[in-house]
Amino acid sequence: MPLFDDVIPTLITDTPAQGRELAIMLARKTIASIQTDADTRAGLRYDYATDTAKLMQAGQIVAIEFQTIAAANNYWRD
Amino acid sequence: MPLFDDVIPTLITDTPAQGRELAIMLARKTIASIQTDADTRAGLRYDYATDTAKLMQAGQIVAIEFQTIAAANNYWRD
Amino acid sequence: MPLFDDVIPTLITDTPAQGRELAIMLARKTIASIQTDADTRAGLRYDYATDTAKLMQAGQIVAIEFQTIAAANNYWRD
Amino acid sequence: MPLFDDVIPTLITDTPAQGRELAIMLARKTIASIQTDADTRAGLRYDYATDTAKLMQAGQIVAIEFQTIAAANNYWRD
Amino acid sequence: MPLFDDVIPTLITDTPAQGRELAIMLARKTIASIQTDADTRAGLRYDYATDTAKLMQAGQIVAIEFQTIAAANNYWRD
Amino acid sequence: MPLFDDVIPTLITDTPAQGRELAIMLARKTIASIQTDADTRAGLRYDYATDTAKLMQAGQIVAIEFQTIAAANNYWRD
């Protein structure tokens, strides 16, 4: 399963900002693993980027992924 | 209940990527345990893979399952 | 309230698979405690098993219940 | 604010089943604190008990409340 | 940003019931910080108090806020 | 990715109120990173600020982000 090997060889990042980017990437790749056709995804992406409710669904998923990544990194406290 | 015995003999995986795949598999098998007819599921799968809101619902479930699996593995820190 | 006494005398299970089954059972019994009429529930069950969005709602609830049960069992690590 | 004093003088319960009942009660009282008119609530209750999506919304809230109560009780492990 | 300074000078409360009230207040003030017009909010409030699905959305937000506040207070165990 | 470097150089804040503001900012910037066109976002913002269900979606995302930030700060207990 090379898709996720590339995305999350580890959950550890240097900074919170990198952790946030990882959360976004992880959410995207999961969608890509469910809908594997790139053209279909491109259409869906336009759809959710211009629809408030869907855009927020995306934002919520990122928030949930970030919870996991932030915990993995001990919230970058140390 | 052989279905879940096969999917999660353990929550422990070697890598984050394998943990992610397990999260996806666990989500799918749960749906399968609720809707046991494979043909009906095939129709539903097409539906959610081409509908942004439903695709995101799927993504959110995976994110939640992954929280559990990542915690089980101490975030693959050690 | 004998309903939940029967379902969760304890949250501890021997295996992850049993924990998953408990999560599903717990979700179902909660619905049953809100909608106590079995015939009405039967109709609703058909509805959610054939509707992608609702099927995913069910999957998400199971994922959340499983988080609790998995934590209770220390993720079956020891 | 006597409403919640009555419901949660404590989050500690003797058994998981009592914890579950508390989760259901807590969810209900919160709705009651937002919609204070009992007649309106009665109408809404009929609505959500016969609508799959809403019934599941209720189930999900209970699952979330139960996470909190289960953690408070150390999952009734000891 | 005086709004939240007033609401959450601290997350610590004396009792679970006070923690619950804080969760409700915190949820409300967040809505107020997004929709700053009081008249518009008044209209929206009527809307969600009489619509089952929205009322439950409100209940779910309170449940999530309460998770945070309960954890902050060590579940009022000690 | 300068966007998040600016928002979350750290998750640590002095007070709960500042943590709440950070949660709101983090949610907003995530939306901005998905929908990068400011004019489109302005239209969407009006939409969600006047629609109860969407306003609550926003509130829920903030609640989830705040869970992470509050945990990072040990709930500002010490």
Image (cartoon, coloured by chain):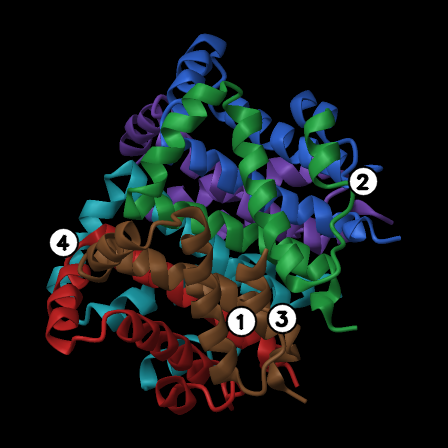
Chain colours: A brown, B green, C blue, D purple, E cyan, F red
- The answer for which chain carries disc 1 is F
User: Is residue C47 something one can see in this rendering?
Assistant: yes
- Quarter holding the C terminus of chain B is bottom right
Residue placed under numbered mark 3 in the picture: A9
Say what amino acid the circle numbered 2 marks. Ile
Structural distance between the alpha carbons of marks 3 and 2? 32 Å
Tell me the tag on residue F68.
1
Which residue sits at x=55%, y=57%?
A: E17
Quarter of the picture holding the N terminus of chain B: top right
List x then y, in percent, for residue D4: 51, 50
Tell me the amino acid under the disc marked 1: Thr
Question: Can you tell which of label 2 and label 4 is closer to the viewer?
Answer: 2
Asked if marks 2 and 1 fall on the same chain, the answer is: no
Q: Which residue is mark 4?
A: E43
- Up the image or down, D70 lies above or below F70; here it is above
Q: Are marks 3 and 4 in contact (CB under 8 Å)?
A: no
Where is residue C14? Give x, y as percent.
85, 37
Amino acid type of the residue tagged 3 in the rendering? Pro
Tag 4, which secondary structure? helix
